[in-house]
Image (tube, helix red, strand yellow):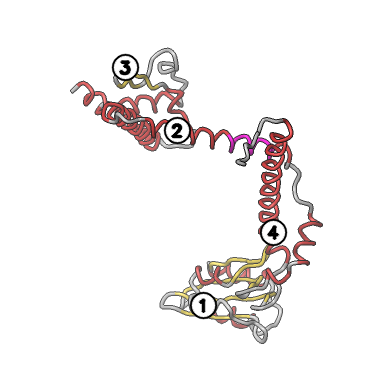
Amino acid sequence: MAHTRNILSFAGIAALFSMCCFSSCKYFSKGVEPIVQLNGKPLYEDDVKSVLSPDMTYEDSVKNIDNYIRNWAVDELLYLKAEENITETEEVDLLVEKYRKSLMIYEYQQQLIREKLSNPIKESDLIDFYKNNSDLYTAHETLFNGIFITMPVKSQAKSEINNLLKYADISISAIEPIASKYGLKMKYFDSEWTPIAAVQRLGMSDISRTHSFEHKNHFESTDEENVYILIVQDHINVGDKQPFVYVKERIENMMVEQKKANFLRKLADDVYNEAIRSGALIRNEKK
């Protein structure tokens, strides 16, 4: 019953802690007074701070503290039950040691990577890879730069937009006054190449991902509520080469990962060969 009362009181303790933590309350601090105790094991304020941030509401703070304390208590209680009921621990010990070894190796590798591979990939190397592997960057859907407009079906803006669509070159400066006047939703895809799938997600579901804009610079679609207009200022057709700026980040990530893999492979070779040279590794060949 004592344990049950402790667990049931967690919410109240969490609320008290939450009220204190952002008002410089010193009542709870590590080494002075634990906020919770379970079978004599304490949990301090410092242990719980990670789930809090200054922009949290009071309710969210209470909820996060309560969840943290509950999860901590459940872990401790289940661990005690496991210790009481599992007698064969040799396999567990082996798994723990194996995990510890793997974790230590991983942390060592990451430390070396941070120290030895801190320099970014050169832009010229990215461009060279792009040029030498152009077959990897063929567009499988239409890419575009342009303007996407959403308006109610009965909007009076439709006639003014239609007048603009008669012109081959439609600028954002021509669209903005109309959008502002009628409160239209407008998205400008100008800073980077965008796949057609982006406008499908915005409501223009009947446009094909491989739609061609060779002979027309806009596309219109309608549902029960809205009219969607896509005005294309530039495009890349299916089968064309994807622009460098569109694939640059992908190439850079790939080259970074390849660089890491090569580094780790060389590290493994170096430590192995050094062990042979130093005599630390001795292979007893069967005769």
Task: Indicate which disc, 2 or 4, sits on the residue closer to the N terminus.
Answer: 2
Q: Give the Cα separation between the discs numbered 2 and 4.
A: 38 Å
> Horizontally, is 111 left or right of 60 in the view?
right
Q: Mark 4 points at which residue?
A: 251
Answer few, some or many: residues within 10 Å of disc 3's Cα (few below 14, many 20 plus, some between 14 and 19): few
Q: What amino acid type is highlighted by mark number 2?
A: Val
- Find residue 96 and name its label: 2
> Horizontally, is 162 left or right of 135 in the view?
left
Q: Tell me, yes or no, whether the highlighted magenta stretch contains residue 109.
A: yes
- Find residue 156 and name its label: 1
| Residue name at image x 41 percent, y 23 percent | 20
Q: Mark 3 points at which residue?
A: 40
Q: Tell me, yes or no, whether the highlighted magenta stretch contains residue 261.
A: no
Q: Give the Cα separation between the discs numbered 1 and 4.
A: 46 Å
Question: Disc 1 or disc 4, which is closer to the eye?
Answer: 4
Task: Indicate which disc, 3 or 2, sits on the residue closer to the N terminus.
Answer: 3
Task: Indicate which disc, 3 or 4, sits on the residue closer to the N terminus.
Answer: 3
Magenta residues, dominant SS class: helix
Which percent across, then down, holds residue 212? 62, 82
Task: Indicate which disc, 1 or 4, sits on the residue closer to the N terminus.
Answer: 1
Most foreground residue, 96 or 242: 96
Q: What is the tally of numbered marks visible in this picture?
A: 4
Which percent across, then down, holds residue 155? 49, 76
| Residue name at image x 62 percent, y 69 percent | 177
Vertically, is 132 above or below 260? below
Most foreground residue, 184 or 95: 95
Residue sticking out furthest to the right: 124
